[in-house]
Image (tube, grey):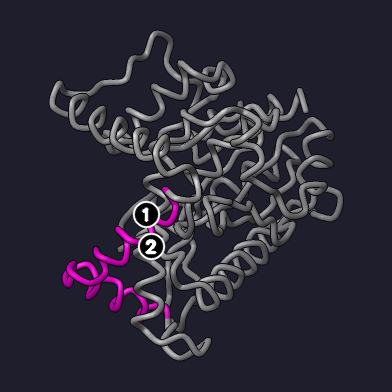
Amino acid sequence: MPGKTMVHSMESERPSGERISLSPWERLSFFAAHSSASALLLVLGLRGLYRFGRLLGTVEWLINHKRRRRFARALRSCSCEGSTGRDKPSAARKYFMRSRCDKIFYLIFDRLSRTQALSLFTVTNQEWLDEAVSQGRGVYLALSHSGAHHIGAMFMPLLGYKAAGVRDRNEGGLRRFVQDRFDRRHPEFRQTRYLFADSYPRDIYRCLQDGYVLASAMDVARGRGNPRQIMELTMFGEKRPFLFGPLRVAMRCRATVIQGFVISEQDFHYRLELVEKLIDPEDSNGQEADIHAALTAYASNIETRIRSMPELLTRI
């Protein structure tokens, strides 16, 4: 699908000549982890490695009492307990297994062939994305801090979409290590644009005007983000902050805004589920009321998704 374009989180084009900055100890430890996961992949195969990841996650669930308590607090803050018939221990165990398998898959992604990788990824309602991209005004993909959106970002260039992404300036070393391996194995990743979370709005304009699909999360943690770009809405029974700046830029560029979630499934299968067109430039008048309506729908969709799948929580 040549000519398609996507951005995974936010930042401007990767600075010219930028190198992945890692300390010698980080490089050694990440290389050891990557080599170990790759060796297990050769011995166990993909399905066997997935089951090994679930076993590791279960062991971690049994012994990591501190993280289990943090998950329980997060679950209470999302009013998830009892809302879907899932008891707290079951949700916690699924969370530990999902997060451990996601980390292992992230490590071994560069070991998969293009054909094998693409067989593991599907996009629900992909026609929405393709139609919006074909209009040439860019697409804003509204993700959230739930699910493995960083894994979804790895697949998109392989589907033929150019990618750009927003990341924190203090991003973890593992992400930078893996990114470096992707860049060297798959030329598509070298075309990816990145934005830092504190970059200027003009970088977002540039991505959309160039026809990219710009994806980021608008459900920010309290105290993060520019206060002038924050709108508070009720989610899980309490006021929570949401960024509205990307929506305003998208409307000015007449870009379609689509909300999606990356769902982890069995045997390292992943699904980008596009759930709603939050703003359609053909129907929008570009008013502030459109931003409020879009953010309200965005928050409601997150609430529904987390209540049905609490294991997607990531802020633990």
- Could you classify mark 1 by the number of other residues whose Cα lies within 10 Å: few (under 14), some (14-19), or many (20 or more)? many
Quarter that holds the N terminus: top right
Quadrant position of residue 314:
bottom left
Callout 2–callout 1 Cβ contact below 8 Å:
yes
Kindly identify which residue carries mark 1: 53
How many numbered markers are drawn? Answer: 2
- The magenta stretch spans residue 94: no
Outermost residue on the front side: it is 43
Q: Mark 2 or 1, which is nearer the eye?
A: 1
Quadrant position of residue 204:
top right
Residue 97, disc: 2
**At 80% from the left edge and 40% from the top edge, which residue is drawn?**
130
**At 41% from the left edge and 33% from the top edge, which residue is drawn?**
196
* Amino acid residing under circle 1: Gly
Where 288 falls versus 74 (above or below)?
above
* Amino acid residing under circle 2: Met
Measured as percent of width and height from the top left, residue 301 is found at: 61, 69
Q: Range of the magenta residues?
A: 49-78
Residue 195, disc: none
Quarter that holds the C terminus: bottom left
Outermost residue on the top side: it is 17
- The magenta stretch spans residue 57: yes
Nearer the N terminus, badge 2 or badge 1?
A: 1
Asked if residue 69 lies left or right of residue 233, the reply is left
Q: Main secondary structure of the magenta part?
A: helix
